[in-house]
Amino acid sequence: MPQVYDAVVVGSGAAGGMAATELCLKGLKVLLLEAGPQHNIATDFHHHFKPYQFPFRGRIRPAERAKYNYAVNAWNKPSFINELENPYTGTKFAWVRARAVGGKTLHWGLVSLRFSARDFQAASHDGFGENWPITYDDVEPYYTRVEEMIGVCGHTDHLENNPDSHFLKPVPFTCPEFEFKGAVEKQFADRHVIHGRSATATEPINGRAPCHYCGHCNRVCNVAASFSSAGVLLPMAEKTGNLTLQTNAVAWKVLTDQEGKAKSVLYIDRLTRQPREAMGKVIVLGAGCLESTRILLNSKDSEHPDGLANSSGALGHYFCEQIMAGDITGVVPKLRGRRSFADDARPNGTGIYIPRFRNLSTKSPNFIRGYGFEGGGGSEEFPGFARKIPGFGAKFKEDVKKNYAAVVGIGSFGEVLARKENYVEPDPVVKDAWGIPVLRFHIEWGPNELAMAKDMVETQREMFHAAGAEVLSERTTSLPPGFSIHEAGTARMGDDPRKSVLNKFNQSHDVKNLFVVDAASFVSSTEKNPTLTILTLSMRAADFIADEMRRGTFR
């Protein structure tokens, strides 16, 4: 007889990694399915290689470029999928997918922002869409627990729409950041320039070494000072003795029994291409927003012709994320020629953050919801702004050095409304390399996003003008859907089973022992990065599962 685990968890990134870890800590026997291989974060990545140590200066070999998405480079290539083996169809979408133990947490930007009370009840403020079935007060204790587990550095700012976290000490502002902050806040009373909030251990926490300021977080932190599921969560799960990890397991569908309960996950061995079945009393999908939805859509059968857990018809619909409408880089003239203080060596996400200021105390006549800016001052080890400076040779190098400590830049993230007409569905013809139907996208920016994008570009210019910064480069056109890598929605939670897929504990309305714990459960995206909330909701759902297991609900 095959082993039946207390829980089968699909995906080992933020959502799946947290669910598996929390369940193991609660004493459950967990099988964790990961579609990719397992890497050793201490030895399997070229953390500190310089670009010139690679044949193509860190870029992907031209002959291999078609295999990888835009985010892949020589440092992170082992974690990401081969796009030719994993196609998708429909409208233009930049879908970044990692397949390795740890998922995208191996290379993410580390920005960790709590959603606010307004975010969970946004429909009550502007009348669009649905409120979440949970409030900030419901999740606040879990935010704190997650932050105490993973470590989030930042500064207490007392902003209503940006609740403070349980912070480790912040990384100090650089000189251009300090100058930018002073100028912007002096001229715009409603705009705040605050420390970036980053999932980085700036001091020892839970036995982890603090950041050693190498500046290579997105190449995988080899000492787990920056958070990843592989470096922080899963080692805790393994220590319990309750975790079984199955790598190279490409999940296809969830199978049900005669009573309609989820009984197993059917997966394909990535290497042998043979089907396997993983049995569990509870099935937890945390494969990433679109992949979890894809699994449910592909789980259709005679009893579930539109996909599993889809009696509402909402599965695949109400996609949301953030629109990246513009960015701008410039130089603070008074700092030109100053000495650099190794600004490039700071952890990811610890620069500056400009929280949402639109549609809070006043209402914009052109759009609802809002946006924020993320950025920083100082330069990278190999500064991108150098491409914007004309010249060649010794004088060019000198011009670059003069600007090195004076550069500041910001990029925008605006909320994409969760609309039913933005959706994904299984392609009826195209399959991936393992014979599994791929997703077809129907996703476009709407009038609200386009109006917001215009305002984002205008306000970034206002702030740079206020700071007296000389603009080196500016992007004023919006990037295509998907570029934020913050996919959300498509299996949203709600109190009404006729309009939602999940309840407030990420539990399927239709199949009570089936849970979706990633951002597919989001009702709206907000303008804030989603990872901290994904971790929080996953921990909360895992606690619910463990409590119900103790009560004998899942047998």
Image (spheres, helix red, strand yellow):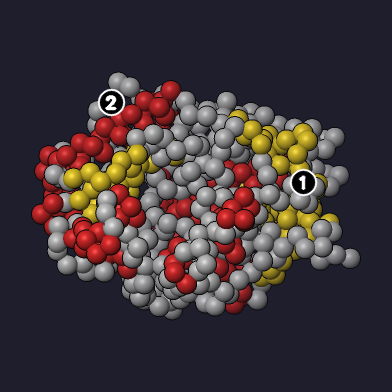
Q: Which mark is residue 178?
A: none
Of labels 1 and 2, the one closer to you = 1
Say if 383 sits above or below 121 in the image.
below
Q: Which mark is residue 436?
A: 1
Residue 472 shows in this picture:
yes
Type of the residue with mark 1: Ile
Between marks 1 and 2, how big is the CA–CA gap?
46 Å
Q: Name the residue rendered at 62%, 68% in the picture.
A: 24
Where is mark 2, residue-wise?
Answer: 363
Q: Quadrant of the C terminus?
A: bottom right
Say if 232 sits above or below 541 in the image.
below
Q: Name the residue rendered at 20%, 51% in the picture.
A: 331
Camera-side residue: 481 or 289?
481
Task: Give left or right: position of 401 versus 505.
Answer: left
Q: Quadrant of the N terminus?
A: bottom right
State which quadrant residue 187 falls in. top left
The image position of residue 138, as x and y in percent, is 45, 47
Kind of element beneath mark 2? loop
**Contact (CB < 8 A) between labels 1 and 2?**
no
Type of the residue with mark 2: Lys
Q: Name the residue rendered at 37%, 25% in the picture.
A: 451
Task: Give left or right: position of 153 versus 128.
Answer: left
